Image (spheres, rainbow, N blue to C red):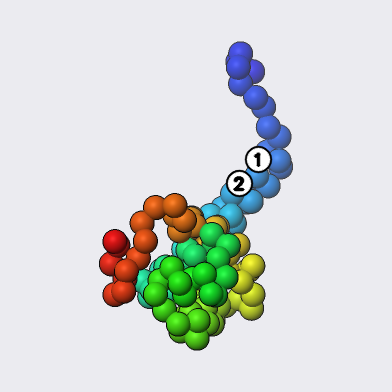
């Protein structure tokens, strides 16, 4: 063995590679599911990732709480999950970050203020 090299037994290396491949497949599936959302549903999902509840999302996006509830139900259905927590976990795996709570405010029509 050369200096500054680490030897891994083949069985261990095979297991590590299998786990990395499975993790990448899982992330790719999560990304595909998130990409299936409409732009507004993705916006609502980012608010969910930020921890905002229905009323706060409605105020931030200038929507009625009922409309936000519908968007949230659509997000859960398209992602194939049954809870907000599961949707947020899937979103984070797909690389979705929270909406910036200190920055831009969205005006009616989805345009940034």
Residue 84 seen by the camera: yes
Q: Are marks 1 and 2 in contact (CB under 8 Å)?
A: yes
Q: Give above or below for 8 relative to 14.
A: above
Q: What whole-number distance in Å separates the C-alpha atoms at marks 1 and 2?
A: 6 Å
Circle 1 crowding by C-alpha within 10 Å: few under 14, some 14–19, many from 20 = few
Q: Position of residue 43 (x, y in %)?
A: 42, 68
Q: Which residue is mark 1?
A: 13
Quarter the N terminus occupies: top right
Instruction: Judge left or right: residue 68 versus residue 80.
Output: left
Which disc, if any, is residue 94? none
List the residue tagged with mark 2. Answer: 17
Work out whether residue 56 or residue 2 is closer to the camera in this orientation and state it: 56
Quadrant where the C terminus sits is bottom left
Residue sitting at x 64%, y 75%: 83
Q: Residue 40 placed where, x, y %?
A: 38, 73
Q: Residue at x 47, y 56 (%)?
A: 101
């Amino acid at each position: 063995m050369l200096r500054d090299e680490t030897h891994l037994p083949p069985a261990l290396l095979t297991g590590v590679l299998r786990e990395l491949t499975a993790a990448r497949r899982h992330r790719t599936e999560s990304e595909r599911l998130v990409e299936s959302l409409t732009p507004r549903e993705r916006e609502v999902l980012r608010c969910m990732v930020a921890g905002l509840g229905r009323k706060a999302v409605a105020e931030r996006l200038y929507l009625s709480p009922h409309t936000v509830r519908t968007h949230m139900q659509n997000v859960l259905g398209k992602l194939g999950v049954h809870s907000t927590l599961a949707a947020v976990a899937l979103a984070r795996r797909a690389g979705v970050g929270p909406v910036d709570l200190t920055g831009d405010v969205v005006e009616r029509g989805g345009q940034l203020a």
